[in-house]
Amino acid sequence: MPQSIGLVSVLVRDYDEAIAFYVGVLGFSLIEDSRLPGESKRWVVVAPADVSGSNGSKGSKGAQILLAQATGDQQVAHIGNQTGGRVFLFLYTDDFERDYANYQSRGVKFVREKVRESYGTVAVFQDLYGNSWDLIQLHHSAL
């Protein structure tokens, strides 16, 4: 089996508020929400709605997100700024205008409005904690 990235951790303040944003606002699927035995942690995985499978396993079309509730001062300090202000994640779409309008109607904060670049159409939004994301539709020539 070739290598692939299965999960990317995103530090969150609270599991349930993060699920509400990623599932309720962005329209992602809740892949898994399990309590870890003997710990106060949960294993919470979300992914864009067309991704299925658990823990990046068969059926997954791409990386999934592990919502990791921050513990300790160091982790808490990095909530919303996991990349020092750079764009953190790139959300590819097959219909930019649909998703852009949908996210705007749901109150998603865009910090850079849409632009058409040589590689595709892109806008930058922030998640509920302030991490920057690119919403991007690649031009066919860029695929």
Image (tube, rainbow, N blue to C red):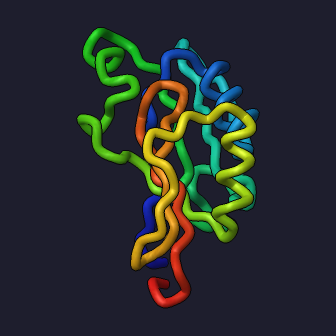
| Direction bottom: furthest residue | 141
Give residue 3's position: percent from left, percent from top: 41, 71
Nearer to me, 62 or 81: 81
Q: Is residue 57 above or below residue 12?
A: below
Residue 118 seen by the camera: yes
In depth, the one of 123 and 56 nearer the eye is: 123
Q: Position of residue 122 (x, y in %)?
A: 49, 61
Q: Position of residue 120 (x, y in %)?
A: 48, 73
Q: Looking at the rendering, which quadrant does residue 111 occupy?
A: top left
> Residue at left 61%, top 33%?
44
Camera-side residue of 42 and 99: 99
Task: Compare residues 74 and 3 and report the one nearer the observer.
Answer: 74
Can you give x and y, in whole percent of width and height, for residue 62 in the image? 56, 63
> In percent of the image, x 50 and y 42: which residue is there?
125
* Residue drawn at 52 percent across, 75 percent down: 138
Considering only vertical position in the picture, is 91 above or below 88? below
Q: Residue at x 48, y 90 (%)?
A: 141
Res. 6 visible in picture: no
Q: Residue furthest top?
A: 73
From the viewer's perspective, is 67 left or right of 118?
right
Horizontally, residue 97 falls left or right of residue 2, namely right
32 left or right, relative to 112: right
Tell me how many marks there are.
0
